[in-house]
């Protein structure tokens, strides 16, 4: 029996729950877990939008409700809790009460249900939005280190909710012995993600705008385009999640690329991929988020001996091709 066969056989004995399995990252994670031989239950309030789930079970459950969290965690060994009400900067800046209400309920209920059901390992997906605003006022900012989350000044609404839930995970380990893992995402992108409607992130939004534009057309950019971010492709994100879950690291850890660039540079890369020359119109009245944000991957490298491998250009090529296809399909309806 090959090493791969032995691993698959071992994985088959582990029953995994992925919440948020109808969403972008959750759907990709389900695929990777099933391909590696795990038994997977997917849970969400919606099914995946662009292709069917291959989870062994998929249940439509509202995890704001306690009884649904108990049901989701029944006979489960490992939980990846990705369920959240969230979106791009336009959505999270104008729906703070809804986001905090929904996500705190989901996360508190899921932790307690996991404890009651005897789950052995629990991974919580947090966000770079937990980092202090005072460290992100400059477009040319330093990468954010995990220990720099405090003194706390998280992004209002979504960031504070994520930081609170991180603390809950840590206390469930301290008080109840639940093996928790905490991952801080830095701008994950790729195919099969939201690309229109207001909840999309900046790579998807820019891919859509370029796909819809004709030669010489004008696209809108929020702010002056000089705000900076780093972006991590979905395949690297999933690989990182699997590695972190299997690690012994219980403290929060960044998962993202550490290559920082401006929104203007992002648009230029996508324009080159699309083969389109476009004009840019800037709107300073639109939400922009922090001025600069980048991941420091020192701890990720130390803990896993691994960092994301897929270049931004390669990831954007795949993402643009998929979004351009969606735009064309919508046009032909």
Image (tube, helix red, strand yellow):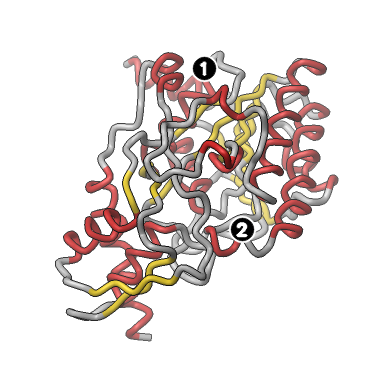
Foreground of the two, 150 or 205: 150
The first of marks 1 and 2 along the sequence is: 2
Quarter of the picture holding the C terminus = bottom left
Q: Secondary structure at mark 1?
A: loop
The dot on residue 247 is 1
- In the image, residue 243 sits, relative to residue 212, either above or below, namely above
Q: Secondary structure at mark 2?
A: helix
Residue denoted by label 2: 92
- In the image, residue 12 sits, relative to residue 74, either above or below, namely above
Residue 110 falls in image quadrant: top right
Q: CA distance from mark 1 to mark 2?
A: 31 Å
The percent coordinates of residue 297 (x first, y second) are 41, 26
Give me the residue at 77% from left, 23% from top.
Answer: 172
Give me the residue at 81% from left, 32% from top.
Answer: 112
Give left or right: position of 226 versus 255.
Answer: left
The percent coordinates of residue 163 (x first, y second) are 68, 36
């Amino acid at each position: 029996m090959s090493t791969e066969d032995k691993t698959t056989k071992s994985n088959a004995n582990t029953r995994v729950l992925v919440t948020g399995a109808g969403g972008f990252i959750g759907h990709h994670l389900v695929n990777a877990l099933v391909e590696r031989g795990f038994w997977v239950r997917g849970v969400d309030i919606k099914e995946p939008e662009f292709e069917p789930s291959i989870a062994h079970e998929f249940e439509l459950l509202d995890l704001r409700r306690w009884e649904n969290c108990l049901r989701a965690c029944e006979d489960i060994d490992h939980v990846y809790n990705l369920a959240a009400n969230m979106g791009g900067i336009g959505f999270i800046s104008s729906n703070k009460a809804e986001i905090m209400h929904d996500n705190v309920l989901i996360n508190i209920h899921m932790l307690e249900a996991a404890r009651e059901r005897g789950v052995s390992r629990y991974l919580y997906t947090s966000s770079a939005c937990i980092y202090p605003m005072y460290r992100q006022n400059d477009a040319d900012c330093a990468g954010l280190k995990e220990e720099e989350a405090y003194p706390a000044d998280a992004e209002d609404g979504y960031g504070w909710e994520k930081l609170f839930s991180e603390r809950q995970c840590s206390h469930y380990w301290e008080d109840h012995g639940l093996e928790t893992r905490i991952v801080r995402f830095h701008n994950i992108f790729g195919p099969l993600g939201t690309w229109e409607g207001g909840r999309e992130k900046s790579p998807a939004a820019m891919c859509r705008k370029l796909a819809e534009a004709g030669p010489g057309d004008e696209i809108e950019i929020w702010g002056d385009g000089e705000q900076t971010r780093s972006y991590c492709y979905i395949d690297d994100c999933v690989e990182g999640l699997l590695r972190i879950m299997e690690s012994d690291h219980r403290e929060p850890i960044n998962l993202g690329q550490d290559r920082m660039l401006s929104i203007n540079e992002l648009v230029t890369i996508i324009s080159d991929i699309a083969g389109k020359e476009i004009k840019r119109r800037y709107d300073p009245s639109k939400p922009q988020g922090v001025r600069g944000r980048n991941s420091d991957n020192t701890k990720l490298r130390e803990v896993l001996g691994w960092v994301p491998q897929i270049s931004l250009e390669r990831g954007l090529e795949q993402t643009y091709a998929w979004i351009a296809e969606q735009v064309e399909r919508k046009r032909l309806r």
